[in-house]
Image (cartoon, rainbow, N blue to C red):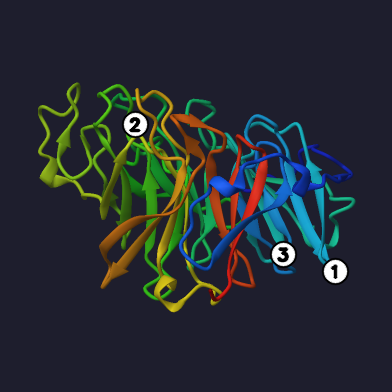
Amino acid sequence: MKFLSFVFSASLCAVTFQVNAQELELPLDKIKLPSGFSISIWAHVPDAQAMTLGDKGTVFVGSKSAGNIYAITENEGKRQVRIIASKLKMPSGVAFHDGALYVSSVNRILRFDDIENTLDHPAPPHIITTDYPKETYHGWRNIAFGPDDWLYVSVGSPCNICETDLDRFALISRIKPDGTNYEVFAKGVRNTEGFDWHPITKELWFTDISRAWMGDNLPPDELNHAPEKGMHFGFPYCHGQEVADPKLGAKHDCNKFTPPAAELDPHVTPMGMRFYTGTMFPVEYHGNIFIAEHGSWNRSTKTGYRIERVQLEANKVTKKESFAEGWLQDNEAWGRPVDILITADGAMLITDDMAGVIYRISYNQP
């Protein structure tokens, strides 16, 4: 992938809007949290998807159908939400590196230079590559910079279940910050919308959303661990630990693929995930993985719609449990968690694209 020196015209000047998030009528009292934790509405952001944190504390937020990129700043307790780019195609993924904001937009990766110093009048972005697939089925891309300073970019499968080019689809790729040196890091990954690196080992962990139409209770969704390049996680032949695909798996031994680090409940749709690296939460939460489960869309009894907590020991999952739930009431959802971000003060932000808000979960000693 080569660097493209021309620019793409997005918003040339930021649009600011003010909404009193506290006036939004959302039943936060329905959210169940462990003792000492509380949840509040932090900002109103329509169609909020992935988040990333700037060096100066700016929270950048992608969107999907809205086509916007948002920047949220805080001054003396007052938050300001700006639209810094608009009319983009599925700009769900955002990443921050060396003062620049990177944005995924289907086949393109855009870079906004010196963004935190130009929020009110951002310059048009550089397009660092246009070489990603143009297909819009699973065309929204999760992006994040790893400890190696490469930009990791997800590419979902172009289908629910099918055999496809696994050097082009159903993978996690990585590129240099200028868009060069494309390589496949992990393959056989149906659709990951969240990954993060262990704060000590620096190894990659990621969620994967399994296929639909195998019934209410199959296949499980996944949490995966990729300590090295070149691992194959089974798609489209195997799902979970050893569930052979009924259509494509008959001639493939599931033991030849890398199994998930943990099976998640079927159809919970795990999306964003983060290791807890703050200090606000009690020590037993430090180093835990938190997963935003967006919730099922075609299961007869809905499931997911929560934040799940995963505990590790020696790189092995030892326990899974619900951390925050209540967005699903009587089989009807009023919110859908998408992504998680740990802020400088150790609080947890959660995007919700159904309610159009970002929540803040904090801890106070009970």
Query: In the image, which disc is placed on residue 76?
Result: 1
| Rendered residue at 57%/58% (across/down) | 341
For marks 3 and 1, the one nearer the N-term is 1
Q: Which residue is mark 2?
A: 165
Amino acid type indicated by mark 1 = Glu
As drawn, 346 above or below 139: below
As drawn, 220 above or below 340: above
Graded by Cα atoms within 10 Å as few (under 14), some (14 to 19) or many (20 or more), the crowding at tag 1 reads few
Left or right relative to 247: residue 107: right
Quadrant the N terminus occupies:
top right
Amino acid type indicated by mark 3 = Gly
Q: CA distance from mark 3 to mark 2?
A: 35 Å
Q: Secondary structure at mark 3?
A: loop
Amino acid type indicated by mark 2 = Asp
Question: Which mark is nearer the camera, 2 or 1?
Answer: 1
311 or 237: nearer the viewer: 311
Residue 292: x and y in percent read: 47, 48
Q: CA distance from mark 2 to mark 1?
A: 51 Å
| Rendered residue at 26%/52% (across/down) | 262
